Image (cartoon, rainbow, N blue to C red):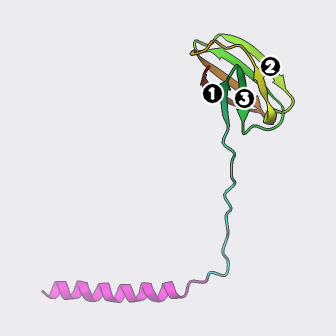
Amino acid sequence: MKLLIKKLLLFVLLFNVAALQASTISFSKTTTIKKATQVEKNVFFNDGVLYLKGFEGPGAIEIYSIIGNKITETLSQELASFQFPFPLELGNMYIIRILFQGKVATFKVVAS
């Protein structure tokens, strides 16, 4: 019983000390971190046209078959408004590789 009382006393004492220390914390030097928002990048193929979403600036677009054979490649001065009419076989899956701003993004699309 004495051990339980000692533990309880120690807990109360330490809790009060921690509460006192917490009340003396100064928030005068607060750092605010703003999270940068990123536009989601997406590629889709519809009615015979390949569309890009979320890209900016110049870049190269490469289209590969699902087994990795390069079908075509094209360059664009502005990827934000890129539309590429190309006769992909409907129902097949393709790999679209986009090179932009020193980065590479890869997407899989099903022609529909």
Q: Is residue 109 above or below residue 34?
A: above
Residue on which disc 1 sits: 107
Total tally of numbered discs in the picture? 3
Give the alpha-carbon distance from disc 1 to disc 2, as whole Å.
16 Å
Q: Which mark is residue 74?
A: 2
Q: Which mark is residue 51?
A: 3
Give the alpha-carbon distance from disc 1 to disc 3, as whole Å.
12 Å
The verdict on residue 9 being magenta is yes
The verdict on residue 8 being magenta is yes
Q: Is residue 101 above or below residue 76?
A: below
**Is disc 3 surrounded by few (<14), some (14 to 19) or many (20+) residues within 10 Å?**
some
Q: Main secondary structure of the magenta part?
A: helix
Closer mark to the observer between disc 1 and disc 3: 3
Residue at 67%, 23% (x, y): give it. 96
Instruction: Pick the residue in front: 81 or 12.
Output: 81
Instruction: Pick the residue in front: 45 or 58.
Output: 45
Segment tinted magenta in the rendering = 1-26
Q: Is residue 94 left or right of residue 83?
A: left
Residue 62: horizontal and vertical position, in percent?
73, 20
Mark 1 / mark 3, whichever is N-terminal: 3
Amino acid type shown at disc 1: Phe
Residue 38: horizontal and vertical position, in percent?
69, 48
